[in-house]
Amino acid sequence: MSNGKLEGRVAIITGAGGGLGAECARVFSSHGAKIVVADINAEAGQRVADEITEQGGTAIAVATDVSQEASVSAMVEQTVAAFGRIDILYNNAAILSEAQRAGDLDVVNMDVDAWDRAMAVNLRGAMLCSKHSIPHMIKQGKGSVINVTSGLGTMGDLTLSAYASSKAALIMLARSMAAQYGKQGVRSNALLIGLAPAENAHATMPQQLLDIIRDNHLTPELGTPRQIADAAAFLASDESSFVTGSVLSADGGFCSHTPSMAPMRELFAQMGSNKM
Ligand SMILES: NC(=O)c1ccc[n+]([C@@H]2O[C@H](COP(=O)([O-])OP(=O)(O)OC[C@H]3O[C@@H](n4cnc5c(N)ncnc54)[C@H](O)[C@@H]3O)[C@@H](O)[C@H]2O)c1
């Protein structure tokens, strides 16, 4: 449902060529925002921008490698040339390819290139996009930056150490920027996402893994891209005008319970009671 809460706003969404970023682009557009689809995959980005335009929205695709400063500064310049301002920066791009996940393991088995790639894309990318966008927000006296993070950025796990470390740092980066530019009207928050696979993503995850993760969400089902985009739209809009420096969880309660909860649920079911 749209209430025009982003009417006239200009939103840069990184990694919006697919997955959660693409849904966010569609939802922000439905609320009236003009969208910049900034993705390293030029073709995918263009497809999303075209789809939005066909639906009556306004969007451009700008092929961007968020890990490279020259590419980011060119993308920001193109945004301002096209739309004259930047109101929202959604730092969503992350490197999650199969090859990346194969190298991003526990620390002893870490492929150092995978570590560096995770930091360059996930973390440096968000810093660079913020570095080049925030001056425009300050000029306007208003803006909202949102860093996409994950439960893995707040709790230890067995693998994906580089991804997790980059996601933890994104929370700190959001807080640093909130402190640094809040008085100039720029808000900055982190959005902590639970598992919300885009339609095609279920196929690449073994069912057993999905079941374990679902068991640890407090909601009946895993999340949907739309649920994530709705939380992002809240942080992007004036509905959250007093929210800054925060971590908003849209994670189905994944990070809110004791580590023993899921096996305890099973045990209590077997016992037919939750009396301890
Ligand atoms: N999907 C989930 O369930 C989930 C859960 C927790 C957190 N997240 C976070 O949400 C965000 C989106 O996840 P997703 O599942 O949609 O991922 P995805 O892999 O489907 O999309 C990531 C996008 O980023 C782009 N990208 C990769 N490297 C880039 C670069 N150097 N410059 C610009 N763009 C680049 C890719 O081309 C792709 O379109 C990520 O930050 C991820 O960590 C997702």
Image: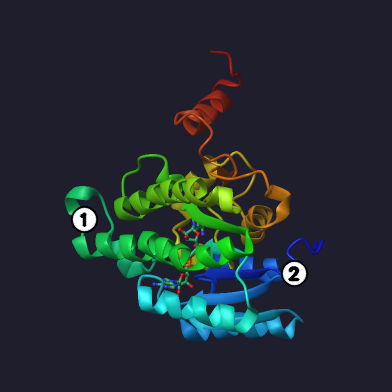
Residue 44, image x, y percentages: 52, 82
With respect to residue 262, does 195 lie above or below? below
Residue type beneath disc 1: Met
Q: Secondary structure at mark 2?
A: helix
Give neighbour class at mark 2: few <14, some 14-19, many 20+ (Cα, 10 Å).
many
Question: Who's the residue at 32% across and 60% down the image?
Answer: 119
With respect to residue 264, does 243 lie above or below? below
Q: Earlier in the sequence, mark 2 or mark 1?
A: 2
Between 196 and 171, the residue placed more toward the observer is 171
* Residue found farthest to the left: 108
Question: Who's the residue at 58% across and 83% down the image?
Answer: 81
From the image, which quarter does the N terminus lie in?
A: bottom right
Residue type beneath disc 2: Ser
Residue 22, image x, y percentages: 59, 71
Circle 1 is placed at which residue position?
110
Question: Who's the residue at 49% across and 70% down the image?
Answer: 15
Residue 259, image x, y percentages: 44, 31
Question: Who's the residue at 55% across and 62% down the image?
Answer: 90
Give neighbour class at mark 1: few <14, some 14-19, many 20+ (Cα, 10 Å).
some
Q: Secondary structure at mark 1?
A: loop
Say how many tags the image has.
2
Circle 2 is placed at which residue position?
30
With respect to residue 115, does 37 lie above or below? below
